[in-house]
Amino acid sequence: MSSLHFSSHAIPLRIPNYCCFKLDSYSEIEYESYKVALLKKGIVLICLGFSDDSAEIMKDIVNTIGLIHEHDALGRTVWDVKIGGETGEEALAISHSDREFSLHNDGAFEQEMPGYFGLHVVRADTLGGGENILVCADRIVESLTEETFQLLSSRKFKLRVPEEFRKVSNFIEASLIDESHGFRYRYDIIERDLCSPEELEALNELELKISLPHNMFKVHLGNNQILLLDNRRYLHARTRIKDKKRHLKRIRFNMPATLRVA
Ligand SMILES: [Fe+2]
């Protein structure tokens, strides 16, 4: 069963006011406030009062509050999420197809998983597809049985690096819940054939919990909106794209856990 099977019943996410911003000009950027909101709640939503199709604002914010994480072997830091990718022919990655992308953490197969990511909506899906679904790791951790939580926190799982992101090795080994109770998960990269029965049972429990509609939140984004998200505190997913012209700009970054912007 797809983890997004019940996503149409997902609850709209209530984002605190201190995480929501309106930006009408470049001079109004509130770097420190974005950083505080990200550290406190793991989410920032910025509504631009103008278009910024090359995502210069998002790149500037991320450059100021954190360290940009390189996306791929081509050295891109900001990249396009649209059908076919930047060149129109990058259909290999799920994000560049119109397919549903089930719940995951970005770069779950990377030894140094990106701590945060940002997306800028150049053009939203006008046909109701491509909805963003979030699952809060804290909520799931609290609902797991003690046995499953302990196993997922301590046991190393073999995770396959998808072909399109392969640089050095084909696999990494890592636990699925880290010491801060953040997640490292993507359904299709877990080498299940190598899992013991108890590991499979723990995975089943996790996957059941994250697929329950009362644990899923939806965030509707319109044109010229920027979402910054803690990649470990939230699993994210995207429903199937219906509008072939849907276009996002994406970036990944890390951020030191201090409240002062350099
Ligand atoms: Fe993603």
Image (tube, grey):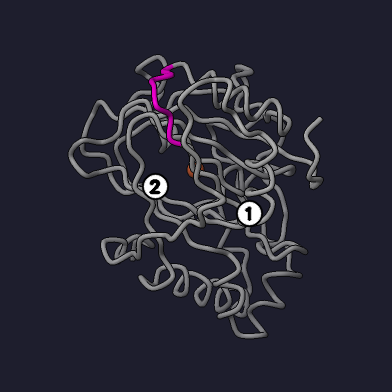
Q: Label 2: which residue?
A: 101
Badge 1 amino acid: Arg
Q: Residue at x 56, y 80 (%)?
A: 143
Answer with the quarter of the image where residue 11 lies.
bottom left
Camera-nearest residue between 222 and 215:
222
Instruction: Find residue 144 and report its horizontal and vertical position in percent.
Output: 58, 80
Q: Residue furthest left?
A: 127
Main SS, magenta residues: loop
Answer with the quarter of the image where residue 241 lies.
top left
Q: Is 67 placed above or below 237 here? A: above
Ligand 1 within 8 Å of the CB at mark 2: yes
Q: Is 181 placed above or below 49 here? A: below
Q: Label 1: which residue?
A: 232
Rendered image: mark on residue 15 = none
Residue neighbourhood size for the residue with mark 2, other residues' Cα within 10 Å, grouped as few (<14), some (14–19), many (≥20): many
Camera-nearest residue between 259 and 137:
259
Residue range highlighted in magenta:
47-53
Camera-nearest residue between 156 and 102:
102
Is residue 51 inside the magenta stretch?
A: yes
- Work out whether mark 2 precedes mark 1 in sequence or the reverse, and give the earlier one: 2
Q: CA distance from mark 2 to mark 1?
A: 17 Å
Q: Residue at x 58, y 64 (%)?
A: 137
Q: Residue at x 29, y 37 (%)?
A: 98
Ligand 1 within 8 Å of the CB at mark 1: no
Answer with the quarter of the image where residue 199 lies.
bottom right
Q: Nearer the viewer, mark 2 or mark 1?
A: 1
Query: Image check: 144 left or right of 188?
Result: right
Quadrant of the drawing holding the C terminus: top right
